[in-house]
């Protein structure tokens, strides 16, 4: 209990003193997580809608891969990204390994299956009666898209929250492809692992409190958006 209290006090000290390194790590964490979740959402929601409303060859395989991918170990994603971005890999010329770009790619890989699967479920829950009503209105394609998004908004918000939670908690892939370089690729989760390995448990706990605070704030914003849409 004393260690937890010490960690909490250390977190408050870091915030109040505006520790530059902690601020840099925290800001990079927020940027990477929001950007990777945004990309996963932009890709995952349309794919989920397509899987829910269209029939085409290979649909079952895509569904199987997306559902199985929800449990993909981050270190596996990190390993594949590392192989592809390694100097001798297909994309080695990009020189993205041990950069923020590599972390974003790894986080997209681990969160995209979640966005696809949960978006698919959200759109599948729209009953046939609602679909017929939408068709009876004879809307344009953009209008139809907005109507379907409105009907599935509750499930879509849950999908985004789940994807965000996955990338916030991710550490294995980020450590593997980012290298945990100070001032470049170090984020809160990798910094926590490093401090634990050094025996600085109070600092690791302090960083964990900061990470949990970020998770609570981002989730609160999404929940407020979700509840606002439901009540209107």
Image (cartoon, rainbow, N blue to C red):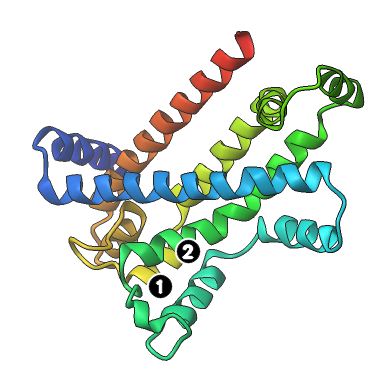
Tell me: 209 left or right of 141.
Answer: left
Q: Residue at x 33, y 46 (%)?
A: 31
Q: Nearer the viewer, residue 101 or 16?
A: 101
Tell me: 184 left or right of 89.
Answer: left
> Can you name the residue that lies furthest to the bottom here?
88
Q: Quadrant of the C terminus?
A: top right
> Can you name the residue that lies furthest to the top here?
232
Q: Nearer the viewer, residue 56 or 170?
A: 56
Circle 2 Cα neighbour tier, 10 Å, few/some/many (<14 / 14–19 / ≥20): many
Q: Residue at x 30, y 55 (%)?
A: 187
Q: Quadrant of the N terminus?
A: top left
Q: Residue at x 70, y 28 (%)?
A: 152
> Can you name the residue that lies furthest to the left here?
17
Counting from the top left corner in percent of width and height, residue 22 is at 19, 48
Could you tell me if residue 111 is visible in this image?
Answer: yes
Q: Which residue is mark 1?
A: 176
Q: Which residue is mark 2?
A: 106
Q: Nearer the viewer, residue 153 or 194?
A: 153
Q: Secondary structure at mark 2?
A: helix
Circle 1 Cα neighbour tier, 10 Å, few/some/many (<14 / 14–19 / ≥20): many
Counting from the top left corner in percent of width and height, residue 211 is at 35, 42
Q: Residue at x 62, y 48 (%)?
A: 44
Could you tell me if residue 1 is visible in this image?
Answer: no
Q: Are marks 1 and 2 in contact (CB under 8 Å)?
A: yes
The span from disc 1 to disc 2 (Cα, nearest Å) is 10 Å
Q: Is residue 40 above or below residue 196?
A: above
């Amino acid at each position: 209990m004393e260690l937890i209290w010490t960690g909490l006090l250390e977190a408050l000290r870091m915030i109040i003193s505006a520790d530059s390194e902690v601020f840099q790590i925290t800001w990079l964490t927020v940027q990477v997580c929001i950007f990777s979740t945004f990309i996963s959402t932009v890709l995952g929601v349309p794919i989920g809608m397509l899987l829910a409303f269209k029939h085409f060859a290979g649909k079952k395989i895509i569904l199987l891969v997306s559902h199985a991918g929800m449990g993909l170990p981050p270190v596996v994603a990190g390993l594949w990204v590392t192989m592809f971005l390694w100097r001798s890999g297909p994309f080695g010329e990009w020189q993205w390994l041990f950069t923020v770009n590599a972390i974003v790619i790894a986080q997209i890989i681990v969160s995209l299956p979640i966005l696809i699967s949960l978006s698919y479920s959200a759109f599948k829950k729209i009953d046939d009666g609602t679909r017929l009503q939408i068709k009876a209105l004879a809307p344009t394609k953009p209008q139809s898209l907005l109507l379907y998004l409105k009907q599935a908004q509750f499930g879509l918000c849950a999908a985004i929250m789940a994807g965000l939670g996955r990338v916030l908690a991710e550490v294995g892939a980020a450590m593997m492809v980012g290298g945990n370089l100070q001032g470049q690729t170090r984020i809160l989760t990798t910094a926590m692992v490093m401090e634990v390995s050094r025996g600085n448990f109070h600092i690791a706990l302090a960083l964990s409190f900061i990470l949990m605070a970020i998770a609570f704030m981002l989730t609160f914003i999404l929940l407020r958006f979700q509840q606002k849409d439901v009540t209107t």
